[in-house]
Every structure is written in structure tokens, then in C-alpha cells.
Amino acid sequence: MGLHPLFTLGGRLQLCASMVRPGTALADIGTDHAYLPIWLAKQGLVSRAIAADIRPGPLQSAQQNIRRYRVEELVSTRLSDGLEAIFSVEADDIVIAGMGGEMMIRIIKNAPWLRDGEKRLILQPMTSIPQLREFLAQQGFAVLREQAAVEDGHAYSAMQVQYAPEKTGTDSLYPYIGKLDAATEDSRAYMRKVIAQLEKKAGGLSVSGRQEEAAALIRTAEQIKIKMQKER
Ligand SMILES: C[S@@+](CC[C@H](N)C(=O)[O-])C[C@H]1O[C@@H](n2cnc3c(N)ncnc32)[C@H](O)[C@@H]1O
């Protein structure tokens, strides 16, 4: 087998990688190609990793990549619906990236062992993000860190989460922009995307006669704009 130089991660997965604690035992749920655990293993940043997926097809390509980059000693694959086939002792940091927020909610609900302050979840949702943030707060999961990354013109957010009911304080903007501040161009790009979504939704509500709900969304969008000006 030839020597394969290590690939670089795109901005979105790089952001997730930066939230993994060095030396951790990792589970990457919905791993697909397994780029994230392979990259972390190659950098010496994980003690071991499970690359898990619900479908056998992605796991086959994960296995090929694990062999290609010669990290078989550190990275194993696992067929698993969410965390169903992962034991608590096997993972301290759990990445779930590139999936819908509703699926993440289901996966977290079905793994009660995540309610342990020693574990960390690194979540990078694609859809239903306010619902996910609200679910986390209601269930006692605190967002310790949240940052945004822009890749191929799209802005994404990733959050590092811990079970810590005493730390789940939230404000009125939390469902929309989580713990992001507006200090970086990437987080401002994410906030602009959220503002556009809120304004579009408000437009739809207004057309269907739901003026009060529309006005509330417009007020939220305005508050995000003010935050962006203040923190710039
Ligand atoms: C779009 S890919 C994301 C790959 C990678 N995590 C990333 O962010 O680039 C989503 C992957 O999640 C897997 N998946 C979807 N639902 C899942 C579940 N309930 N449990 C485990 N894997 C799941 C899919 O099979 C697919 O390979």
C-alpha cells in the first residue's frame, strides 16, 4: 500500500476537532468516511476512537480509510444507531456532526449515560438548531463553548456540551445563536444567516396574518444585529 499524505480537514470538521479534548477516548457518531477520527489519531490527539455509523456502506469506506492511513491500532469501526452499541466506558468525548438536530435529540435521549459531567458532547447540527439548543438546556446540558466556521460559503456552528444542570443559564437569543459572540467574521456570517432565516420566517407569518409572532421574530433579529454591532 502506498504512502498517503494526511489530508486536511475542512473548516467545519476542523472546528469540531478543535473541541475534542487532547488524549480523550472518542466516539464519532455518524462518521461516514471517518475523516475526523483518522485525522485526530494521526495528530496524536486521541487515545483511541470508535468510528460509528448506522449504515454498513459508510462503515466500509471508513474501514478502507482507516487502513489507508494506517491507524487500525487506534481507530475501530462500529455499526450503531446513535450510541446504542457504544458503552459508556468506551468514550469520553462524543462527536455528532453533519446531522439534523432532531436526530441528535433522539440520540442523546436514548443514551442516559451522557448525563455525566465527565463526558463531553461536540455537536455540529445542520437543521432544527434552536430545537436542539432548547432541548439541551431543558435536559441539563450546558454549552461550554460555541464557535462558527465558514466552509464553501456556508456558515456552521459547533458546540462543546457538558451535563451540568447548574450551568444551563440561557438568554432570549440562546435558541438562535447559542453561546456565539460576534468577535469573529465566521460567527458574524453565522449570525447573518440566522437573521435572514428569522426575517424570512417572519415574512411568512405576516402573510398568514400571524402579526404578533412575526413581530417577535423581527425583534429577535434586531437584537442579534445590535449584539453584532456591540461585539464587533
Ligand atoms: C452527512 S454524514 C456526516 C459525516 C460526518 N460526521 C461529517 O460531519 O462530515 C451523516 C452520517 O450520519 C449517519 N447517520 C445518520 N443517522 C445516524 C444514526 N442514528 N446513528 C449513526 N449514524 C447515523 C449517516 O449514515 C451518514 O453517514
Image: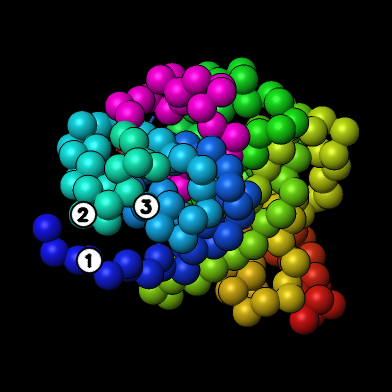
Please say whether residue 84 is one of the residues in the magenta stretch. Answer: yes
Q: Quadrant of the N terminus?
A: bottom left
Is the residue indicated by label 2 positioned so its CB lies within 8 Å of ligand 1?
A: no
* Residue at 18% over, 39% down: 60
Type of residue at label 1?
A: His
Q: Which residue is mark 2?
A: 68
Q: Are marks 3 and 1 in contact (CB under 8 Å)?
A: no
What is the span of residues highlighted in magenta in the rendered image?
78-99
Look at the numbered disc 2 and give the secondary structure of its residue.
helix
User: Which is more N-terminal, label 3 or label 2?
Assistant: 3
Q: Is residue 51 visible?
A: no
Residue 199, position as x, y percentages in the image: 60, 63
Whole-number angstrom distance, CA of label 1 to CA of label 2: 7 Å
Whole-number angstrom distance, CA of label 3 to CA of label 1: 12 Å
Q: Which residue is mark 3?
A: 38
Q: Are marks 1 and 2 in contact (CB under 8 Å)?
A: yes
* Residue at 49% over, 63% down: 14
Q: In this orientation, which residue lies closer to the viewer: 108 or 137?
A: 108
Q: Quadrant of residue 218?
A: bottom right
User: Which is more N-terminal, label 1 or label 3?
Assistant: 1
Residue 98, position as x, y percentages in the image: 42, 49
Q: Is residue 211 above or below residue 141?
A: below
Type of residue at label 3?
A: Ile
Q: Quadrant of ligand 1?
A: top left
Q: Is residue 191 above or below residue 23?
A: below
Type of residue at label 2?
A: Arg
* Residue at 71% over, 26% down: 116
Residue 127 located left or right of residue 116? left
* Residue at 51% over, 47% down: 46
Q: Which residue is mark 1?
A: 4
